[in-house]
């Protein structure tokens, strides 16, 4: 299996910033795309940002200009830096990785357990 462990969530005031981290571990051969999704109460899970192993990124329109996704391929870790946070950014944030395990010939999507981000005064 591939395990993803997120950290960095919490309570943030509007206009504040935070940095989420997610480390992948396990018998990993390679990790293709890594990303962050979020799910607010009563809403579907949505993509926030993603980054390929080569460093190409894409962002949801709602966070473009306020977020930066990055990764450390040696540490199998992905980061999400968010600034100018708004109450509508409140959600559970999930880390995702499309990875291939040692011995496998295919990739699978793996998910973290989620970390709560609450933007409120």
Image (cartoon, rainbow, N blue to C red):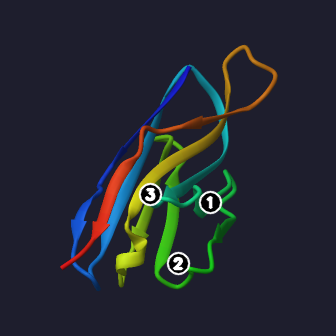
Res 41 quadrant in image: bottom left
Q: Which mark is residue 50?
A: 1
Between residue 71 and residue 97, name the one nearer to us.
97
Residue that numbered label 2 is attached to: 63
Residue at the (29%, 85%) spot, across then down: 15
What separation in Å lies between label 1 and label 3 (alpha carbons)?
10 Å
Residue that numbered label 3 is attached to: 79
Measured as percent of width and height from the top left, residue 40 is found at 46, 61
Outermost residue on the right side: it is: 105
Between residue 55 and residue 109, name the one nearer to us.
109
Res 52 quadrant in image: bottom right
- For marks 1 and 3 on the same chain, the one whose residue lies earlier in the sequence: 1
The C terminus lies in which quarter of the figure?
bottom left
Measured as percent of width and height from the top left, residue 59 is found at 62, 71
Element on which disc 1 rests? strand
What separation in Å lies between label 2 and label 3 (alpha carbons)?
15 Å
Res 88 quadrant in image: bottom left
Residue at the (50%, 47%) spot, across then down: 95
């Amino acid at each position: 299996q591939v395990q993803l462990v997120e950290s960095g969530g919490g309570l943030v005031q509007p206009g504040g910033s935070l940095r989420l981290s997610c480390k992948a571990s396990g018998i990993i051969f390679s990790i293709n795309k890594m990303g962050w999704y979020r799910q607010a109460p009563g809403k579907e899970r949505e993509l926030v940002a993603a980054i390929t192993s080569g460093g190409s990124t894409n962002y949801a329109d709602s966070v473009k200009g306020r977020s930066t996704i990055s990764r450390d391929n040696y540490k199998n870790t992905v980061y999400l830096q968010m600034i100018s946070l708004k109450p509508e950014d409140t959600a559970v944030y999930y880390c995702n990785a499309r990875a291939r395990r040692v011995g496998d010939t295919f990739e699978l999507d793996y998910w973290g357990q989620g970390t709560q981000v609450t933007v409120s005064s």
